[in-house]
Amino acid sequence: MESVGVVLAMLLAVIGSGYLVRLLPFAVPLPLVQIALGAVISGVFGHGVALDPEIFFLLFLPPLLFLDGWRIPKVGLFRDKGTILELALGLVVFTVLGAGFLIHWLVPTMPLPVAFALAAIVAPTDPVAVSSIAARVPIPHRLMHILEGESLLNDATGLVCFRFAVAAAMTGAFSLADASLTFLWVALGGIACGVAITVSVAFIQRVAGQRLGEEPGSPILVNLLIPFGAYLAAEHLHASGILAAVAAGISMSYVELSGRALATTRVRRAVVWDTVQFSLNGVMFVLLGEQLPDIVARALHDARLDENMTEWTLLGTALLISLGLIVLRLVWVWVSLRLTILKARRHGRQIYRPNFRLVVATSLAGVRGAITMAGVLTLPLALPNGAPFPGRDLAIFYASAVIIVSLLVASIGLPRVLRNLEVPEESAELAEEDRARHDAAIAAINAIDKAAHLHAEHQEDADVHASAIDHVRGVYEHRLGVGGLYDPSRVRVAEQAEREYRLAALQAERKAILALVHGRELSDEIARKLLREIDLVEARYG
């Protein structure tokens, strides 16, 4: 029962953190509040949750990575694939080498392979942490797409480097050839598993639904299970379960564009996934907070055993490691940008040269999170000869410190760096939206005209059909701006005005129905039906 109480306390902490952030007189990142509440829960219950890293990876990461891969804009992902791969592959290896030597220099008692292992696990940014920061910081859309793509793909690089660094610490041997081949299999095998699972499940589900029918909740449940299936299949083949979950999400976005899912299924599925995302995001940071007291206590114990290390030395070293990661990222981004500009000039192409503040923002946005925490906890407890694994508790402490510092730096630094920064607008996206709305409205009007001819022979209700046709057609003509030249900007203004009036009308409808229910003039069953219709329309304008 105590475990159930801890779980309920964590969920309440996730809910309460949102209200607490709004009550505070100053801006505090939501993940930091959740970490603090997790530490409080650990103190109240007397101990933190016994976190099994493998279970943590399985329960939390697949659905969140699947959803990020599903919802990330694919146009931006493929458009900036060169930059994303430079960050996801090159930057991680550069960080492992640079931070590994830095950590070994700062903490000589930590063996070099262990320092490389720590550097490898703090090198990848975390998509969940990046998303949580982006929700409160006005990051430019294109930069956000690059950061999301980087954080989705760099985990495989970091985890492969981590795996081989740990192996070197355990055995004292390292093979670059084996590491390269392993990385290829881990990455390509994981991506293949994710795509194959999603496409296969979608095909089987479609065939079974056409021949046998299906329960209303079945497609949603299948959708929730896909990331776990992809993750487990990839891990069984010793490939990257993380990349499998991401690839499954990206594949799911293309499967969804087939348009075979019912509208009600899509609406319900979106609500379910939003709830899952909100809950798991928050619980992950609460769990991190619950681990912190024990992590700090063990690190302080190790520090006291070393005559050359004090509590202040421990804290200062953690800050220097975090600063080193930011500097390494800044150097890589700046050099990579200079090489890209130089290459473009050689080919005679024009390229946007971003303000240096945007380069700094990209460096500060390297937020670490749950993947770093879960990964570092997988460090072995002992060497093959039975001796304790050297520097394990210190590595876990430094990884935790990097997570907290990166969250603080991004939350405090990004708003100031990005303030009043002029970035070229994504005009192409707006033009695509206008064109899609225009073409969809034209198709709708043609369909209305076709349906009107089919119903023309029913003379008994001709006036009713004519009125309905005029009403529906008028909605789409309004979107097209009929009555003058098509002007997307004026149509957007008109849609905003329509939104305000519709919301006011819907609120009045809701109040009228509730008044009838309170006066016992309407049954609660009918009221729920009518209120659901109003809610769905309001969601479209909300």
Image (tube, rainbow, N blue to C red):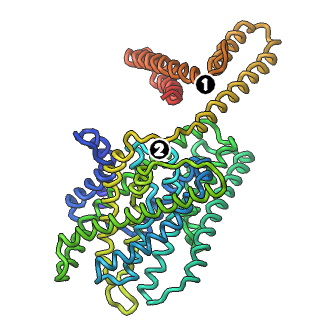
Q: Secondary structure at mark 1?
A: helix
Question: Is residue 522 shown to the viewer in this render?
Answer: no
Q: Secondary structure at mark 2?
A: loop
CB atoms of marks 1 and 2 within 8 Å: no
Q: Is residue 461 left or right of residue 139?
A: right
Q: Is residue 315 left or right of residue 175?
A: left
Residue 299: image location, x then y, percent: 24, 73
On residue 257, the disc is: none
**64, 106: nearer the viewer:** 106
Q: Is residue 345 left or right of residue 170?
A: right
Residue of label 1: 488
Looking at the rendered structure, the kind of residue marked 1 is Pro
Residue 433: image location, x then y, percent: 61, 33
Residue 98 against residue 222 in the figure, above or below: below
Q: Residue furthest toward the bottom?
A: 385
Looking at the rendered structure, the kind of residue marked 2 is Pro
Question: Is residue 351 shown to the viewer in this render?
Answer: yes
Q: Quadrant of the N terminus?
A: bottom left
Residue 317 in which image quadrant: bottom left
Residue of label 2: 140
How far apart marks 1 and 2 lie (CA) works out to 23 Å
Residue 478 against residue 535 in the figure, above or below: above
Identity of the residue drawn at 17% across and 75% down: 310
**288, 326: nearer the viewer:** 326
Residue 432 in which image quadrant: top right
Q: Residues within 10 Å of mark 2 (few under 14, many from 20)?
A: some
